[in-house]
Amino acid sequence: MIHRCPITRRAVLKGLGAVVALPWLESLAHAAEKAKPAQPPVRLGFVYVPNGVDWQRWHMETAGPLDTFSKTLEPLADVKKELLVFRGLTLNEGRDHGDGGGDHPRATSSFLTAAHPFKSFGKDIRVGGISVDQLAAQKLGHLTRLPSLELACDRPTSPGMCDAGYSGVYRNAISWRTPTSPVPTEINPRLAFFRLFGDPSRSSDAARGRQRMVNSSVLDLVLEDSKKLGTQLGGTDRLKLEEYLHSVREVERQIQAAERLPLKQPPAGTTAPHGIPSETADHIRVMLDLVALAFQTDTTRIASVMLAMGGSDRAFPFLGLKSTHHSYSHHEKKAENLDALHAIDRFYVEQFGHLIRKLQAVKEGDGTLLDNCLLLYGSPLRDGNLHDRQDLPILLAGRGRGAVTPGRMVKHPDETPLANLHLSLLSAFGIEAPRFSDSTGKLARLKV
């Protein structure tokens, strides 16, 4: 049977331990709440990249309409009307403030908290506050089945001391539920998928459920339910339901293909979790696709993705590069290192573009799913060679259901707190707070 939830327009399909939440359907919204206009919710997404950027090829000088793009941001030119490019935002609490080395763990842990971490690799790990995504989850996460979703596309570093007296925990998490509780990330797309749609192995017929999931699809487990729902929907919603279920199937196929292909050999002494694609780009894209599905189904409205861990030493042989991201970020102004760093920067920007286009392709209400999202992309370091925290490389995609006017580059005064943007995102999400960490107020000129 179809299971309606208390929230307007929400419904799920259930069967044999699987749960498939549905996308925004006008038929269900109006049937459930005819007296009120159906309005899609706002979603918040955060996409983190480590090690700063090749600033000269990232930054743009002219404020105003995005008529031209920097070399690094060129892959986003076709979605320029959906972007805000920022200048002048600073992460002051990511600076050392007398703590000496440890720039990468400080940067990572302060990205969404805008708070200074305590230098420790023991039991007293803590930051100066919770992260913006978890504050949003605490306030409004009860409206969805998952309060938030935390994903990563890189294996975490050891939780022991990793950088000048800081625990590896600080480099492994951008989300902090409390000042002492970092939120662990999921790097296995199949396990993330189970979080979204349920695990058939938990049914009474576990063996049959597992085999059907591997060989077929979670959709087969809710087929009867979906057929019944189809008879209750209008023509437009039936088409939307078919498109949505097709997108679920495509993500499943990507995950299943990854499980059937041989994995590359991991470093000695480690074992790769089953189901992780062997190619970096494939891993990142399937995780971003899962974020799109999570938003589309309203399974969660808050998600964060770490494209790599803090201080990442990921190699990029598929870009023709011989060394690692962290090594190239310490470029020493050498042309060959900057060229390599630029290639990595563009690669990550391209992945963000994939998420933007994925959300843009989903119709929702009178617009698109992207229209109802706000996606922050960036790094808590400007230049990895300098480890500086001012004028950070930060982008915002989406409109937040009218809270933002994209298609522009906005220059803010030097040393404007990144926390001002976080405070503004909370407001667009329906949470009014007097301040967030070291914020001095909401960002000006988000809307024109």
Image (cartoon, rainbow, N blue to C red):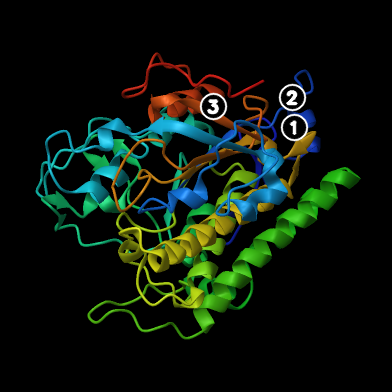
Measured Cα–Cα span from mark 1 to mark 2: 6 Å
Q: Is residue 203 above or below residue 396?
A: below
Q: CA distance from mark 3 to mark 2?
A: 22 Å
Per the rendering, the mark at residue 391 is none
Secondary structure category for the residue under label 2: loop
At x 63% / y 47%, what residue is drawn? 69
- Residue under label 3: 429
Q: Which mark is residue 33?
A: 2
Look at discs 3 and 2 and give the one toward the viewer: 3
Q: CA distance from mark 3 to mark 1?
A: 20 Å
Question: On screen, 214 above or below 381?
Answer: below
Amino acid identity at mark 1: Ala
Q: Do residues under tags 3 and 1 come within 8 Å of each other at their CB atoms? A: no
Report the residue at 24% width, 43% height from top.
106
Position of 65 with respect to 416 (left or right) is right
Q: Residue at x 32, y 37 (%)?
A: 177
Pointer 1: residues within 10 angstroms few (<14), some, or many (20+)? many
Which residue is label 1 attached to?
Answer: 29
**Front residue of this view, candidates 368 and 140:** 368
Of residues 8 and 348, the one drawn nearer to the viewer in this rendering: 348
Q: Residues within 10 Å of mark 3 (few under 14, many from 20)?
A: many
Quadrant hosting residue 156: bottom left
Q: Residue 103: x and y, percent?
A: 23, 47
Q: Residue furthest top?
A: 434
For residue 157, side relative to residue 39 (left or right): left
Helix, strand or loop for disc 3: loop
* Quarter in which the C terminus is drawn: top right
Upstream in the sequence, badge 3 or badge 2? 2
Give percent across and percent down for residue 282.
54, 69
CB atoms at circles 1 and 2 under 8 Å apart? yes
Disc 2 marks which amino acid?
Answer: Glu
